[in-house]
Amino acid sequence: MKATVTVMLKNGVLDPQGKAIAHALGTLGFDGVNDVRAGKVIELDLAESDAEKARAQAEEMARRLLANGVIESFRVDVGG
């Protein structure tokens, strides 16, 4: 079963990478970009075939390793 974990900085946490991307987009002529938040996507191929069990496994992985709960939030999507 495939699981995708999307990790983003929590609101209120400074995002220097996002700011740098926003600035670079502006210098390339992309006007109207008000803000950019950078994150990471982790794709997992799990042996589990039950979607709810796979989701629980991926959420536990995110809590314990993939996301820093102090400054980051995460979302898990499961399918296929």
Image (spheres, helix red, strand yellow):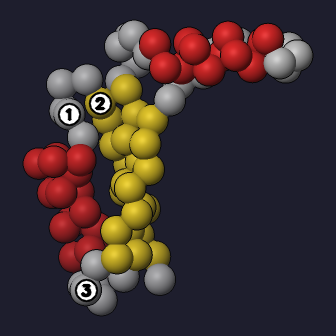
> SS for tag 2?
strand
- Residue 57, by quadrant, is bottom left
Which residue is more in the foreground, 39 or 70?
A: 39
Image: 39 above or below 35: below
- Residue 52, by quadrant, is bottom left
Question: How crowded is the residue under tag 3: few (<14 C-alpha within 10 Å), some, or many (20+)?
Answer: few
Q: CA distance from mark 2 to mark 1?
A: 5 Å
Q: Which residue is mark 3?
A: 47
Q: Are marks 2 and 1 in contact (CB under 8 Å)?
A: yes
Image: 55 above or below 36: below
Q: Is residue 15 left or right of residue 59?
A: right
Q: Which mark is residue 68?
A: 1
Could you say where residue 32 lies in the image, as x and y percent from the top left?
A: 82, 14
Image: 52 above or below 50: above
Q: Is residue 55 left or right of residue 20?
A: left
Could you say where residue 66 lies in the image, as x and y percent from the top left?
A: 23, 47
Q: Which residue is mark 2?
A: 72
> SS for tag 1?
loop
Q: Identify residue type, mark 1.
A: Asn
Q: Identify residue type, mark 2.
A: Glu
- What residue appears at the point 83 percent right and 18 percent down from the top-left corner? 28
Q: CA distance from mark 3 to mark 2?
A: 27 Å
Q: Identify residue type, mark 3.
A: Ala
